[in-house]
Amino acid sequence: MTDPLAGSNTADPPDSSSAWVRELTRPTLHPWQFLLLYTAYTAVAFQWPTFVYAAQQLSLSTLEGWRTLATLAVLLTLLMALLLGVPMLVSRRSFKLMAVLLLLGNGVASYFVHTYQVVLNVEMMGNVFNTRLEEASALFHPAMLAWVGVLAVLPSWWVWRVQWVPHRRWLRLGHWALGVALAGLWLYLNSASWLWLDRHMSRIGSMTPPWSYVVNSVRFVQRERAAQQPLALLPDLPAQDMADTRKRVVVLVIGESARAANFSLYGYSRPTNPQLSQLPIEVLQARACASYTTAALACMLSPRGAKVDEHPPEETLPAYLHRHGVDVEWRSNNFGEPPRMTVTSRLQKRDLLRRCDEPGQDLSDLDRAWCTRPREGAFDAALLLGLEQRIAASSSARVLIVLHQAGSHGPAYHEKVPAGMEAFTPVCKSVNLGNCPSGTLVNAYDNSIVHTDTLLAEITTRLGRLSGWDSTLVYVSDHGQSLGEGGLYLHGAPSAFAPDVQMDIPFLIWRSQIGRRLQPQAQAQAGSPEQSADPQQPHRRSGRYSHDEVFHTVMGALGLRSGAYQADRDVLQHEPR
């Protein structure tokens, strides 16, 4: 039987002046030599952040520190040998194909780690799998091609040209087994280093390619499969809860990547909330339950809040309300929504924009003005098209409208605001955020906050025009955002060590005059020394809140007090627990 890794080599003419060039670009190696070179290159080109992190955590002035660092290197070498060992023992092509795929994956992963300082944990891989093409294209920069080309494509070309020294299969197996045994022996003899490795493995595993994206991708897929289990139904609402015919509407606006630190309502020095600061809204100090969209939405739409993962999958707030006769419409300019969610209607931005071109649509003058503007980019104004008319035409006494914004999603913050409507200039127009001139990144981000301010103020105007409706606007962001603090950009850091700017979020509530008259007790309880004396100005609520309160606050605003509702988590009724 012919060994697929065996072969013969035809020597170049001895007098050839370019023989060394051909040997360099088409080398002849034993598989074990190749494996060692490949592992060393992976460590130098892609895994250096891991060794830098380890060096910062270890005391390298001691022998024990260096021994632990060496143990980490041996462990990563052993893992690479185990990953590539099976294809190496099977055939030349499968061996090379695996090596090339890992190089390309490492190249792309290391670019994002280096450029945005992201951590490729299971949450971040969830972001990757749930990112739409238009969002992914916003991350493209010519530097990415250069980075991947130099660090991954060229080495992949070299890998594919490698020739193998003729040898027996048993010899190849012996070399591989000896290497694995020696590495295992080192790890055994240096078991004192295991405690340090175990303590830091979560962080190391999220920053070390290929394990960061390979293992965490598998974990994400497993989590998604678990989520496909049948949904448990929440406790039914008694018939008397739905018997009240008073008209109530809640507009729940789910913000994207908006951090409280850049809202002037929370003390930011810049006027990023020029319109909301003139309205009677409640301003709540809040903390996100996760630093990425899918988990944050699952949390805020569940009666269990942050403990949603501790229980079997159950129906979300929109599906729960729809099942009991509430008219629920979900309008989205984003992604990451719960996949199994039955509502009255579910519309993407593109569906809403079609109304601009359809004759006979009952649109306001402002809507028609928006329809005449450029529609490229991720502007959220389309979410309001026909909003007032949609609510007024509902045959249900209770309506929930969910608006899922593009908001302040990075890195292309400048695309979230129509040209000519920037409040702060100049703005960064690059997705390579680390290269943005000083101040331009914050300008671009702050403009997206001002755009959200305009959107929310317009919603209060439209709700205020609804005759006979008890109207409530609830705005809460899914998570915050890093703008270069500590070298971090974007979001998705593990919650255990995510910076406050990724976790502290705006949480705002506005109620119509009908709602205010119906809730005098809640209004009294909302008072605090921090409030403005002017009832037409924002009121800053004392205490700390989170996504845990969203489900119950929406329920309470709709007048539904039974079933899964918990009064002590309804911010319209009580101070936080």
Image: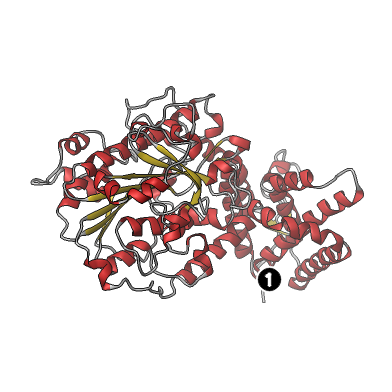
Confirm whether residue 251 shows in the render: yes
Give the structural element (helix, strand or loop) at label 1.
loop
Left or right: 21 as drawn, with respect to 144: right
Q: Quadrant of residue 99?
A: bottom right
In this orientation, which residue lies closer to the viewer: 256 or 117? 256
- From the viewer's side, name the closer residue of 571 and 382: 571
Q: Residue at x 8, y 46 (%)?
A: 360
Rendered location of residue 65, percent (x, y)? 86, 49
Q: Which residue is under mark 1?
A: 3
Pick the residue in front: 41 or 468.
468
Residue appearing at x 26%, y 34% in the figure: 374
Residue 306, image x, y percentages: 51, 60
Residue at the farthest top position: 426
Image vertical order of residue 40 relative to residue 114, above or below: below
Q: Residue at x 22, y 67 (%)?
A: 243
**Residue 129, can we see it?**
no
Q: How many marks?
A: 1
Q: Quadrant of the N terminus?
A: bottom right
Query: Is 428 drawn above or below residue 62 in the view shown?
Result: above
Q: At which x and y percent is residue 200? A: 73, 55
Q: Position of residue 411 (x, y in %)?
A: 47, 39
Give left or right: position of 19 versus 239: right
Instruction: Give the image's coloring scheme.
Output: secondary structure
Q: Residues within 10 Å of mark 1 (few under 14, many from 20)?
A: some
Q: Residue furthest right?
A: 63
Question: Which amino acid type corresponds to the residue marked 1 in the rendered image?
Answer: Asp
Q: Up-down: is 135 above or below 570? A: above
* Residue 427 drawn above or below residue 523: above
Residue in front for this viewpoint, 199 or 276: 276
Residue at the location (79% across, 66% down)?
A: 180
